[in-house]
Amino acid sequence: MDTLTGIRVFRQIVESGSFAAAAGRLDLSTAMVSKHVMNLEKRLGVRLLNRNSRTLSLTEPGRVYFERCKTILDDLEATELELGSLNDAPRGTLRMTCPSFTSGQRLADILAEYRHHYPEVILDVSFEDRVVDIVEEGFDLALRVTRDPSSLPAGLVARRIRQVNFVLAASHEYLRQHGTPQSLDELSQHDFVTVRDFDSLPLIGPEGVVHVPIKVVLRYRAGSAATSAVAAGIGIGALPALLFDDPVFRDRLVPILPQYPLQKASLYAVYVSRKYVPIKIRSFIEFLSERVNSFRDPDIRPVKAAVG
């Protein structure tokens, strides 16, 4: 008799709780189910099940064999699904959450290009800066930016996509009114726009990381709103370097002390740990990684002091 079928029958018996229930689920006769178990026990030389007319229980060898059988069958199912998907186009709804500062034209262009290649995928994107529980809230994927990989959720897969550099910036109007800081001491006297709660900035200088105290005048919970506030002239902010090349902001933002960049961060794609990753998730991560790694940060140079 077929060993693999016997293993499947044995697992179903244990999970169903009886020979009759397993037979019904497998569309086999109870006699055939019993025959498969007897064949397994004969081949292995051990008794797998204690059974009488009322009860059914695993023997000690049966318990070990059952756990191994589950692993074998789960691996086989995952492999069959993965191989079967190789010739399939990604399809279905891909739900993902992203930092709000990514809600600009660059990501929109990437999403449009991805949809052109994979028109059967519906993209459901949520832009928010809170740490979303993707399992609890039903997301397939999260894009996260962090300086500390250990802050990423345990039990999930976090694939690094690329480095994200942050630079201090202000608008031309702000600098016209308040002047351009030329040192860290001067920087501490200026107004700042921040995202979430902090009162100092970790800047990298010749001697290493320096934590510079700042005067916060506006605090946002969303990075995209903070960028607009900086561009509007409210204060200085720590912004992704790529924004200096964004058509919306490149003529409105001026770098401040670029010789003192912020500590480097990285963009991660976070998804549920599983042996079989759905092709819609895998294809998007590969596509995103290829596109964003083709971007180059703009050449950011110091500016002369503005006269207030």
Image (tube, rainbow, N blue to C red):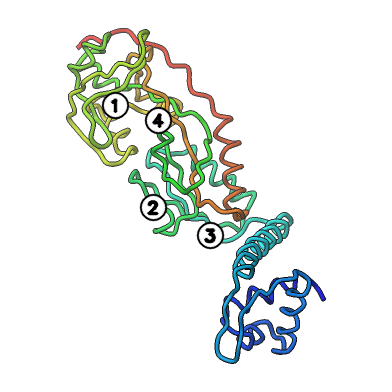
Could you say whether the residue bearing mark 2 is in a helix, strand or loop? loop
- Which kind of residue does numbered mark 3 sit on? Thr
Mark 1 and mark 3 in contact (Cβ < 8 Å)? no
- Which kind of residue does numbered mark 2 sit on? Asp
Residue under the image location 77 percent in, 75 percent down: 42
Give the percent coordinates (x, y) of residue 140. 49, 54
Q: Earlier in the sequence, mark 1 or mark 2?
A: 2
Q: Nearer the viewer, residue 296 or 208?
A: 208
Q: Residue furthest right?
A: 1
Gap in angstroms between the C-alphas marked 2 and 3? 18 Å
Gap in angstroms between the C-alphas marked 3 and 4? 30 Å
User: Dot 4 corresponds to which residue?
Assistant: 147
User: Dot 1 corresponds to which residue?
Assistant: 237
User: Dot 3 corresponds to which residue?
Assistant: 93
Q: Is residue 286 left or right of residue 27?
A: left
Gap in angstroms between the C-alphas marked 1 and 4? 17 Å
- Which kind of residue does numbered mark 4 sit on? Arg
